[in-house]
Amino acid sequence: MPATIPILTPKEAPTWCPGCGDYTILGALKSALVELGLEQNEVLICSGIGCGSKTPHFVNTYGFEGLHGRSLPVATGAKLSNNKLTVIAIAGDGDTYGIGGNHFMHTMRRNLDITMIVQNNAIYGLTKGQTSPTSRKGFVSNSTPFGVLEEPVNPITWAIAAGATYVARGFAVDMNHLKELIVEGVRHKGFSLIDVLQPCTTYNKINTAEWYKQRVYKLDQNHNPADKFAAIARGEEWGDRIPIGIFYKENKPTYEDGLPQLATPLVKQDITNVNIEPLLNKYA
Ligand SMILES: Cc1ncc(C[n+]2csc(CCOP(=O)(O)OP(=O)(O)O)c2C)c(N)n1
Ligand code: SF4
C-alpha cells in the first residue's frame, strides 16, 4: 500500500511566525515519512512544549504533545510497549538540551531505536525569547540584557560522547538535505539525533537564515562518519564555517535487543488469561 500522508492535514495548520524554520522542518519530516513508505498507523511523533513542539498536531500519524522536556520519556515508553512502531521525538533546543537534558543523555546511552529531531533556534521561542543552552556566549535576550555568561552546549559532541549511534545536523532552509538526514536517521537502528539549525525570525536576530547561509557547508566524502575522533573534530567546528550532514554513525545493539521478551511486541501479547489479582492483593 502506498503511503497516504498528506502534506497538510485539513484539521489543523501551523500558526508559526512568517519565516520560522519550523515550517521547513515540518515539510522535511512529512517528505521523509512519504519516502520511507510508512503507513500513518506505523508512526508515533512525540514532542514536548514549545513552538516547534506543536508539530505532532500537523502530521497525520499517531502523536503526543507532552510536557516541556519530556518527549524522550514518552518516546521510550511507547517504543518499549510497541517496538515495531517508528518513534520520532521532536522538540526545541530549550526542551531537549535544557530541561530535558537528563533524559536526552540517558536515552542516548541506552541506544534506544528512536529518532530525535531538535528544532534548534538557540532561543526559547514560545515563552518569548529567553536564552537557551545553545544561545551563544554574549547573546543579548529578554532574560540576559547584558549578554549570556555561559558557554553554549554542543549537541553534536555531546551526543557522540553520550553514545548516540547516528549524529547529524541539518539546516532548516535546506529542506531536501534535511529530509535525507531524517530518512537516514529513521532507517538507522539505534538512537539518532538530528540537530536542526533553525531561524527564529521573531526572537533571534543574530542567527538568522542569512547568517547561517553564509556559514553552513555540507560534509562530503572526505569525512568518514565511522571515525569517532574525526566526527568530534568536525563537531567542534563553529564560526565562519559550520558543517551540516552526518557526523557520526555506528552499528551497535539497541536497548530493545537486550530484551528477548519483546520478540512479540508487548501490545500484541495476549493478557486475557493473566490474573493480576494475587499481585493486587499483595499491596491491599
Ligand atoms: C516544566 C515546565 N517548565 C517551563 C515551561 C515553560 N516553557 C514552555 S515552552 C518553553 C521553552 C521553549 O523553548 P524551546 O524548547 O527551545 O522551543 P521553541 O519554542 O523555541 O520551539 C518553556 C521554558 C513549561 N511549559 N513547563
Ligand atoms: S517565536 Fe520563533 S520559533 Fe516561535 S513560531 Fe515565531 S519564529 Fe518560530
Image: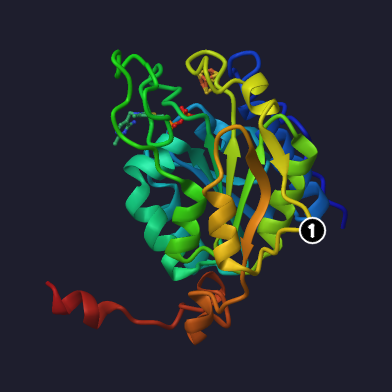
Residue 193 visible, this angle? no
* Residue at x-position 48% and y-position 83%: 258
Q: Amino acid at mark 1?
A: Gln
Q: Residues within 10 Å of mark 1 (few under 14, many from 20)?
A: few
Residue in the image at 44% along x and 47% along y: 71
Between 283 and 85, which is closer to the camera in this rendering? Answer: 85
Q: Which residue is mark 1?
A: 221
Horizontal and vertical percent position of residue 205: 52, 14
Kindly identify the residue that appears in the image at 50 percent across and 26 percent down.
51
Task: Examine the rendering and report whether any part of residue 86 can be seen.
Answer: yes
Q: Is residue 178 above or below residue 10?
A: below
| Image quadrant where residue 90 sits | top right
User: Residue 244 placed where, x, y %?
Assistant: 67, 44
Q: Is residue 272 above or below residue 80?
A: below
Is 189 situated left or right of 6 in this image? left
97 vs 1: above or below: above
Q: Position of residue 42 (x, y in %)?
A: 67, 58
Q: Is residue 33 left or right of residue 101?
A: right
